[in-house]
Amino acid sequence: MERLQKVLAQAGIASRRKSEELITSGRVSIDGEPCTTLGTRVDTTKSRIEVDGVEITRQRLVCVVLHKPTSYVSTTSDPEGRRTVMDLVDGVPVRVHPIGRLDYDTTGVLLFTNDGDLTNHLLHPRHESKKTYRVTIIGMPEKDDIERLKKGILLEDGVTSPATVRVLRNHPAESVLDLVIHEGRNRQVRRMFEALGYPVKRLKRTEFAGIQLNGLRVGEWRMLSKEEWDRLYRSVNLEVPPYPEDLVHSFKREQIREKREAESDGVHRRIRRRSGK
């Protein structure tokens, strides 16, 4: 037996908070009877649950990580007709959405899920989900600049929370730093360095809420491992749902098949070139 609002959230209907609003407004019914009581528990294997008269189908929850390239917007659609990150995850077996955004010119870790509750928790400020960025800037920051990053930078929308900073390369022409923050303001990292007088040349998110790329090439995505899955949910104090092991295994089999086909095509092309055909 599970709480009704959790079932709605896991079905991808809405976040848990929005699901509560659906319930209290009388738009949800169980076995044909309207339910307006929050906290109602249901057995999804026996009960018929409807929203606005339409039966819900409980989705298998998934979460994938994409190595986002530049020149893609992190939205499900774009009125200007630009390429979206959804074009890169069309092979995911269920419909997913990006958890937050990366700027058009920023690369790296971008998570996708069909769990509205997980999305809401990861993006909520109270959970302080950490994000690590590899920042390449023009110029060489002084020690005072590093201290200002650590204490907080005054931007037009307020002072940033303290950041963790590690200098990897310090050179008058170009410097590289790792920056760890937990806020998610628009273009925050770029604005922080611009406020110090250092334009950002390249920006890559290397980690989000403990999830890393682990060798993913640009434009590739993968399912989370069982360990990553458990750790991600626990990091935001959510009950860990069943891991989609069958979907993960199916995805890995498909990867192996595609790799073999690509290798076979490559062999055939080399044979044709050698034979002059």
Image (cartoon, grey):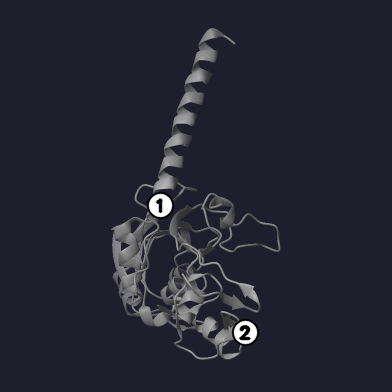
| Nearest to the observer: residue 79 or residue 104 | 79
Task: Work out whether residue 172 can be spotted.
Answer: no
The residue singled out by tag 1 in the image is: 246
Q: Is residue 58 left or right of residue 32?
A: left
- Residue 193 visible? The answer is yes
Q: Secondary structure at mark 1?
A: helix
What secondary structure is found at the residue carrying circle 2? loop
* Kind of residue at badge 2: Arg
For the residue pair 26 and 140, the one nearer the viewer reads as 26
The CA distance from mark 2 to mark 1 is 33 Å
Few, some or many residues within 10 Å of mark 2 (<14, 14–19, 20+): some
Query: Which mark, by number, is residue 27?
Result: 2
Residue 75: x and y in percent read: 59, 64
Q: Quadrant of the N terminus?
A: bottom left
User: In front here: 149 or 97?
Assistant: 97
Quarter of the image for the C terminus: give it: top right
Query: Which amino acid, by three-letter code, is at mark 1?
Result: Asp
Residue 148: % across, % down: 34, 77
Which residue is located at x 35 percent, y 61 percent?
211
Locate residue 222, reporting x and y percent. 42, 51
